[in-house]
Amino acid sequence: MTARIIMKLLIEDIQDEPGAVRVLTLKHPKRPVLPAWQPGAHVDLRLPDGRIRQYSLISDPEDLTRYRIAVKCEENGRGGSKWVHESLDIGSEAHISAPRCNFSLDGSGAYHFFIAGGIGITPLMAMARQALASGASFDLAYCTSLEVPPFAAELHAWFGGRLRIFSAGGAAKRRFDVRAGLPKQEPGVRIYCCGPERLTGAVREATRDWPEGQVHFEVFKPALDENFKPEPFDIKIASTGQILRVPAEKSALSVLKDAGFLLPSSCELGVCGSCLCGYREGVAIHRDSVLPVHARQDRIMLCVSRARVQITLDL
Amino acid sequence: MSWRGVLENIHIAPAASYEMEELLEARLVKGRGIEGDRYFLGTGTYSPKPAVREVTLIEAETLEALARNDPPLQDKPIILAPGDHRRNLTTRGVPLNHLVGKHFRVGETVLKGGRLNFPCKYLEELLGLPVYMPLYNRSGLNCWIIEDGIIRKGDTIEPIDP
């Protein structure tokens, strides 16, 4: 997929929201305008050790003078969000990629139902604003463990009665009931879900009979797959016939990079879509969270997906 | 060959895909590249590939042609700001395509033309602009550094070899 420019942006402002969420406002030190983006898009934030974290843009896509991202400090995370909270300050430099969009409003939908869990509200903020601006019919359900979740005031101001907050931690203890709360399946209905595995898993389960393309998920964590046992397999390079062995403990991406192939990659978790590659023969074992079902017959994400015995890649 | 050109811009990028940064002067190091640049540091997209790219040059005249859509290879003009093209040196009045294998002077340094630069899909993706065809055959020159030294914006560029 697409290579993206990386910019050294300046942190102009920091605001804290409830639930250990920190909102960074970023601007370019020289250019007045940042690369354009679509609601639902995310940027990569590069950590000093080269690792990458992805954050949805929550600002107004019409205002390209600044980006805003929200970072929840995950105490038990992999360290990226803690670094953001502890090391970045107003005036600091953050290395940010141009935006990429894997999750966008489906223009063919007649009714949009957005459902967010916790910090999963972030991509849906800009998407629901887009739906509002375009006069589309929509509702936004926001599940949270807090009595007053991040962005509650802004969301109320924007969406009024279209916003429903389901606060498991509040006095009312109102939980979202996935079975009863989702809209009924009809051709024009679209669901967009972003949140923890518990929520996305429940929505997936409740909508498993829905036609493909009506239910969309944004995932920033790899799919849960504790029982998966990687097996070794061979990669055949279509252009040269070269065969490369992928041992069980290595990814196809790392084997190809070691062999000198220049391949784009980013999250290496199967969620960003950077390392997309075409394939011809073979049975792919798709383990990513980004490729839609219709693309899986001839495309593969090299960072996490594997193959049975041998696969021929379009390289 | 009789010509005399000028160095209009100097750009480096600290690593692959990073935005280019403009310098007013830079140090060229033989066998390495421009101090601070991704190819000096070995962190460029094409660093693992053989072939010289210690310093890359492109003609300002090419960028102006793209801005005029001349020849009309794309739907509309493409405006590439200096540095967006990701070459290190933007030159004016220098016939880069004639300098393969030739020595020439940039300020106090001496470069030798290696191979003509090819446009790449990577650049097209990075910029989100259809620059591949319009840059074909005028994507600049990849050079060796023969004599080290400092180059400055506005330096004269002139031939050494006949």
Image: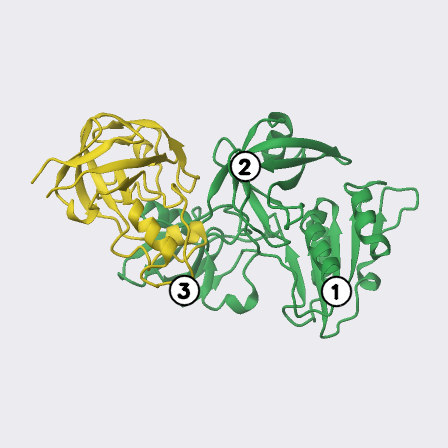
Q: Earlier in the sequence, mark 3 or mark 2?
A: 2
In front of the other: label 1 or label 3? 1
Query: Residue B134: x percent and y percent?
Result: 33, 58
**Whether labels 1 and 3 share one chain:** yes
* Chain that the image shows in green: A
Give the vertical position of B83 relative to A36 (above or below): above
> At x 24% / y 55%, what residue is drawn?
B137
Q: CA distance from mark 1 to mark 2?
A: 33 Å
Q: Colour of chain B?
A: yellow
Q: Few, some or many C-alpha atoms within 10 Å of disc 1 (few <14, some 14-19, many ≥20)?
A: some
* Residue B71 or residue A217, whichever sits in front: B71
Helix or strand or loop: what does disc 1 sit on? loop
| Chain under callout 3 | A
Q: CA distance from mark 3 to mark 2?
A: 39 Å
Q: Few, some or many C-alpha atoms within 10 Å of disc 3 (few <14, some 14-19, many ≥20)?
A: many
> At x 66% / y 72%, what residue is drawn?
A211
Q: CA distance from mark 1 to mark 3?
A: 39 Å
Under mark 2, the amino acid is His
